Image (cartoon, helix red, strand yellow):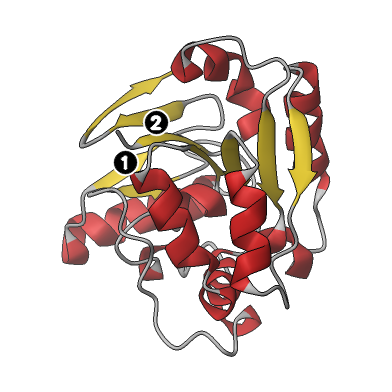
């Protein structure tokens, strides 16, 4: 069973995780990937998300995928109960996931039933394609990204930060353009909402 917890801001919805997990999460482990934030100036959201896991009693296993062999990444995944991918620049994140083959490893873990937790960029990458957020993130920070194909683990396109600054106008522009041109199945969520995915079904709470 594929289980994914897709948020705009994990810190604002972490209280919903334990019920979604199905048992106490205290003492569980999470592979924590903050790669998307490495090219951003503002990164407090990563610290906030980290604190949320600590508050839940979850043990954090930091995973820097840059320059790592896929066997090293796979080992951390196998030793973790959950995988978390933080926010930041979606294009840079996808670039580094593909370079390390971590994208395929994450797909394999999701298919095996491991819970995946995404925050902003970490949620966006599960869509079939990430180009729809080019107004939100700077593509120029991913000079080695050859295509915009995402992990394709969901059949919708998560659009984070609905009605939340500093992204309010950007999200509105993306929605307007999509209604006019692309017609993608966008699922917009605010920082206080989360998309809970079970196999091919999903619901929004918060």
Going from N to C along the chain, the mark reached first, 2 or 1, is 1
Q: Nearer the viewer, residue 152 or 9?
A: 152
- Judged left or right of residue 135, residue 150 is left
Q: Which residue is mark 2?
A: 195
Q: Is residue 206 visible?
A: no
Q: How many marks?
A: 2
Q: Which residue is at a point 73% across and 78% down the rendered structure image? A: 67
* Residue contact at pointers 2 and 1, CB within 8 angstroms: yes
Across and down, in percent, residue 75 comes to 64, 55
At a point 76% along the width and 43% down the height, the residue shown is 61
* Residue 17 occupies quadrant: top right
Question: In the image shown, does 179 or 124 lie closer to the viewer?
Answer: 124
Q: Which is more toward the observer, 172 or 86?
A: 86
Q: Which residue is mark 1?
A: 187
Q: Tag 1's secondary structure?
A: strand
Judge whether 66 appears above or below 43 on screen: below
Density class for disc 2 (Cα within 10 Å; few <14, some 14-19, many ≥20) is many
């Amino acid at each position: 069973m594929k289980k994914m917890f897709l948020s705009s801001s994990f810190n604002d919805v972490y209280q919903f995780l334990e019920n979604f997990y199905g048992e106490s999460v205290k003492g569980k482990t999470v592979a924590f990937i903050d790669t998307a934030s490495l090219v951003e100036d503002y990164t407090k959201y990563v610290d906030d998300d980290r604190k949320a896991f600590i508050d839940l009693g979850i043990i954090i296993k930091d995973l820097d995928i840059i320059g790592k062999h896929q066997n090293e990444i796979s080992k951390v995944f196998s030793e973790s109960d959950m995988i978390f991918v933080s926010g930041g620049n979606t294009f840079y994140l996808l670039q580094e996931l593909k370079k390390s083959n971590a994208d395929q490893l994450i797909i394999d873990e999701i298919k095996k039933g491991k819970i995946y937790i995404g925050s902003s960029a970490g949620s966006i990458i599960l869509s079939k394609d990430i180009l729809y957020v080019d107004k939100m993130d700077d593509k120029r920070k991913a000079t080695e990204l050859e295509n915009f194909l995402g992990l394709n683990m969901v059949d919708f396109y998560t659009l984070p930060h609905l009605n939340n600054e500093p992204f309010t106008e950007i999200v509105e522009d993306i929605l307007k353009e999509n209604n006019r041109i692309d017609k993608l199945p966008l699922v917009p969520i605010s920082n206080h909402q989360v998309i809970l995915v079970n196999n091919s079904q999903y619901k929004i709470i918060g």
